[in-house]
Amino acid sequence: MRKVCFQLQVKPERMDEYIERHAAVWPEMLRALKRNGWNNYSLFIREDGLLIGYFETESLQAAQAAMETEEVNARWQAEMAEFFVALEGARPDTGFVELKEVFNLEEQLAAVEDD
């Protein structure tokens, strides 16, 4: 399973509404994400609008491509796009900045315990 961590910037003046929208994501969107390999998906937001997302998937490209086929995703992304800074025409689900993992406790502990 691949771990994906990403960053987006929510417009500070839209944060409250963004948070409200994510308190009750459309059930059909939730099911589409799960069906298409977006597992253990979480979003975290800082007071200035910095948004960090995390999910696990077999393949980021396959998960994104599968969501491309979902009508509900097109509607959701169109509604969410207005909340973000600097997407430059990209949708939030494909326009994010992916972050590189530099430390993982379980992996390092497993390596040490194997010695």
Image (spheres, helix red, strand yellow):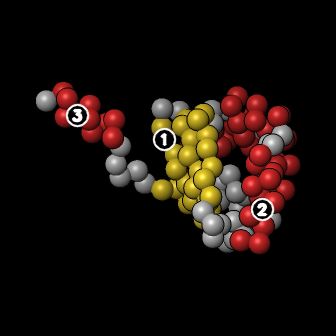
Task: Name the amino acid, label 3.
Answer: Ala
Q: Earlier in the sequence, mark 3 or mark 1?
A: 1
Numbered tag placed on residue 111 in the rendering: 3
Label 3 neighbour load within 10 Å: few <14, some 14-19, many 20+: few
Tell me: residue 64, above or below residue 102: above
Q: Earlier in the sequence, mark 3 or mark 2?
A: 2
- Quadrant where the C terminus is found in the figure: top left
Q: Which residue is mark 1?
A: 3
Q: Secondary structure at mark 3?
A: helix
Numbered tag placed on residue 16 in the rendering: 2
Measured in 3D between alpha carbons, the distance from the residue under mark 1 to the one under mark 2, in whole angstroms, is 28 Å
Task: Name the amino acid, label 1.
Answer: Lys
Judge whether residue 86 can be spotted in this image: yes
Q: Secondary structure at mark 2?
A: helix
Numbered tag placed on residue 20 in the rendering: none
* Residue found at x 72% / y 40%: 67
Tell me: residue 9, above or below residue 33: below
x and y, in percent, of residue 6 in the image: 55, 54
* Residue found at x 60% / y 63%: 46
Label 2 neighbour load within 10 Å: few <14, some 14-19, many 20+: few
